Image: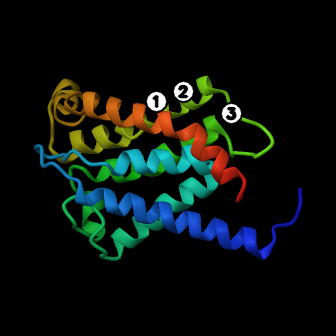
């Protein structure tokens, strides 16, 4: 493995910061819907891993989560603070990190010499989007004291499937070209 040049390190830091900012910008496109709002943040978190790989993508989400935890208004509804990790929708915040890491591991880190097969990008995108729901629905069930799992799924999973399918399709459509572009700079 070749050592990283200062330029490559700078580009990687800039990309991580850029994707953390994109995830934060997703908060301004929020549609309130019960205990869990519709947002674009999950798409940008998944896209971070899909485009930059698990480590840089996960780093971008961690930077975003850290900014929100210390009070920056980057969570849904332009809110911030650690208390949001304990809210009914707080599990989805953990899910953003899992999404970036899962999508990144499945798609792999982009390399300019090779192109990732489309089937792999599709699987990475779909699973990256779905993994957000694992901690999200679990925490929703616990915090809202839902008696049954179907009740938790009716609040925090089923209403979002169509919107997330559209976001996932858009991300998968742009990912191959952006992966090639980013690979030249990594």
The residue that mark 2 highlights is 123
Q: Position of residue 99 (x, y in %)?
A: 47, 43
Instruction: Measure the alpha-carbon separation of dots 3 and 2.
Output: 12 Å
Residue 116 is marked as 3
The residue positioned 61% from the left and 70% from the top of the image is 13
The residue positioned 15% from the left and 41% from the top of the image is 145
Q: Position of residue 29 (x, y in %)?
A: 23, 54
Residue nearest the viewer, comparing 73 with 131:
73
Q: Position of residue 98 (x, y in %)?
A: 48, 46
The residue that mark 1 highlights is 126
Instruction: Measure the alpha-carbon separation of dots 3 and 1.
Output: 16 Å
Residue nearest the viewer, comparing 145 with 151:
151
Residue 7 is marked as none
- Residue 129 vertical position relative to residue 90 in the rendered view, above or below: above
Badge 2, how many Cα within 10 Å: few under 14, some, many 20+?
some
- Residue 109 vertical position relative to residue 164 in the rendered view, above or below: below
> Are dots 1 and 2 in contact, CB under 8 Å?
yes
Pointer 3 or 1: first along the chain: 3
Q: Secondary structure at mark 1?
A: helix
Instruction: Measure the alpha-carbon separation of dots 1 and 2.
Output: 5 Å
């Amino acid at each position: 493995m070749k050592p990283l040049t200062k330029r490559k390190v700078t580009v990687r830091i800039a990309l991580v910061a850029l994707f953390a900012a994109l995830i934060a910008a997703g908060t301004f496109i929020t549609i309130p819907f019960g205990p869990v709002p519709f947002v674009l943040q999950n798409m940008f978190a998944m896209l971070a891993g899909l485009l930059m790989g698990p480590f840089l993508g996960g780093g971008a989400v961690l930077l975003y989560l850290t900014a929100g935890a210390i009070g920056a208004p980057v969570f849904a509804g332009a809110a911030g603070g650690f208390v949001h990790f304990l809210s009914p929708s707080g599990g989805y915040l953990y899910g953003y990190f899992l999404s970036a890491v899962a999508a990144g591991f499945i798609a792999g880190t982009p390399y300019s010499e090779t192109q990732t097969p489309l089937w792999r990008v599709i699987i990475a995108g779909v699973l990256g989007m779905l993994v957000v729901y694992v901690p999200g629905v679990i925490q929703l069930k616990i915090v809202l004291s839902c008696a049954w799992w179907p009740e938790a799924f009716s609040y925090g999973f089923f209403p979002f499937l169509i919107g997330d399918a559209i976001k996932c399709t858009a991300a998968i459509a742009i990912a191959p070209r952006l992966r090639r572009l980013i690979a030249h700079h990594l």
